[in-house]
Image: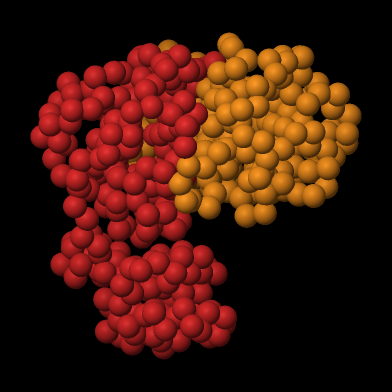
Chain colours: A orange, B red
Amino acid sequence: MISNKWAKLIKSLHLKKHRKAEQLFFVEGEKAVLELLQSDWPVVALFATDSFLNQHTALCQRAALLQNCSAAELEKVGSFSSNDAALAVVKIPQWHFTPPAPTDWVLVLDSINDPGNLGTIIRIADWYGIRHILCSEDTADAFNPKVIAAAKGSFLRVQLHYQPLLPLLQAANRPVYGAYLGGESVHQLGLPQSGGYIVLGNEANGISDAVGRHVSRKITIPAFGQAESLNVGIACAIICDNLRRLGGA
Amino acid sequence: MISNKWAKLIKSLHLKKHRKAEQLFFVEGEKAVLELLQSDWPVVALFATDSFLNQHTALCQRAALLQNCSAAELEKVGSFSSNDAALAVVKIPQWHFTPPAPTDWVLVLDSINDPGNLGTIIRIADWYGIRHILCSEDTADAFNPKVIAAAKGSFLRVQLHYQPLLPLLQAANRPVYGAYLGGESVHQLGLPQSGGYIVLGNEANGISDAVGRHVSRKITIPAFGQAESLNVGIACAIICDNLRRLGGA
């Protein structure tokens, strides 16, 4: 059973202000919780169905607190509406951004609002071997349950850094690519193998003027039909794919 | 004001069985409704705020029935939870699939369940100039409000055909590419300029064995990091981008 005290705590963690105050967030769903338990992240508490606990007895011992409960209890405190088997309460990690190695790519998110988009971008970064994402301070919170759900296990491998973008980009002695609707075609760029920054802008307004002044090269995904735009997650994936096809592994 | 009769009808159109019985669906949101009014699709009824009607007086005359109402009324009958300005009730079009021209690409969806994914795929098809999507009969319904919302205006330009896939693929005298996790790299394929079919499988289970037997070439998106998989919409976008970068406009 999930005690009232824990139920209240988990429910509070749906909101950023409580996650910030407690320095905790939660991970739901069998697959994501299993990936978490296989990582070295500190797990404060694990609530799971008997079936989950029996199948993964050894792994579950990783949690500082372990408690069996029903799927219905998990659904009451978490954000999933069905098929829930496990929920873990986890300490928010402390990440510090250090300038990347010369061949690394870093994503820069200028005010991405939608948690689903942010989660998708984290998953794409992980697929393409990008370890660091710089986020403007108004970008959706990395530990929002919707972000964690959309990122699948990739939130474990990609670090998000929330800080003012301008000083960072000013100091960047590396190419800064920005995704625009009217830039150079990513199909013809011949992007360098050397890495750099890739800036993606807000869903409705694109890259802000202030950030845009630090973009050294505007890039765009060529359209062959009539759609007005692509979702920012889709654009991120296509740009990363174009970078990696040129740059190699 | 939206009359009780219309409110009841629109609410019923959230469900596929009622859309099928009435042969109607609805389109919400200022931008999508404007694109609809600029098309030649028959608009049965338009409900909109005074501000929308005043700004687009001439266009609104396209609707057979025109009625002003409040944003709150729109939110009550539609699927948007805020900022709604217009909702149009539209006749479901009758589309017939004819084998594509030799240079055309056709998407084939084998049991795509999530309406958001389907809408995203429609938008991507439109961006890359793909006009036809073949859907297994258990794929999410094209006129589900969540599909229409995710597709943006692209539902107006891409035709979806729900029919058994096996007879169609059996009769296809064109290459059939299937997206798998362990196929040939799309970066090294040298895909032909000649067009063909691209099969995308179910979110959890991939392409079914029966459909897979008609795939002439298994393709995959190379991974450079550790994510286990990509969302099907993301995979669709990357494959289309790789096709078009080779095939030209």
Find residue A218 and report its horizontal and vertical position in percent. Answer: 72, 37
Residue drawn at (62%, 34%) of the image = A185
Which residue is more in the foreground, B21 or A39? Answer: B21
In which quarter of the view is residue A133 placed? Answer: top right
Indicate left or right for B76 with A132 as reference: left
The quadrant of the rendering that contains the N terminus of chain B is bottom left
Side of B84 where B155 appears, left or right: left
Image x and y of residue B35, in percent: 46, 65
Residue A62 image position (x, y, % from top left): 52, 17
Quadrant position of residue B8: bottom left
Q: Is residue B201 left or right of residue B232?
A: left
Name which residue lies at 61% across and 23% down. Answer: A243
Q: Residue at x 37, y 37 (%)?
A: A84
Left or right: residue A100 versus residue A188 is right
In depth, the one of A238 and A225 nearer the eye is: A225
Tell me, yes or no, if residue A177 can be seen here. Answer: yes
> Residue at left 72%, top 32%?
A177
Marks counted in the figure total: 0
Q: Position of residue A152 (x, y in %)?
A: 48, 30
- Looking at the image, which is closer to me, B210 or A238? A238
Residue B9, picture quadrant: bottom left
Instruction: For residue A57, say whether it is visible.
Output: no
Query: Please, is residue A108 above or below residue B59 in the view?
Result: above
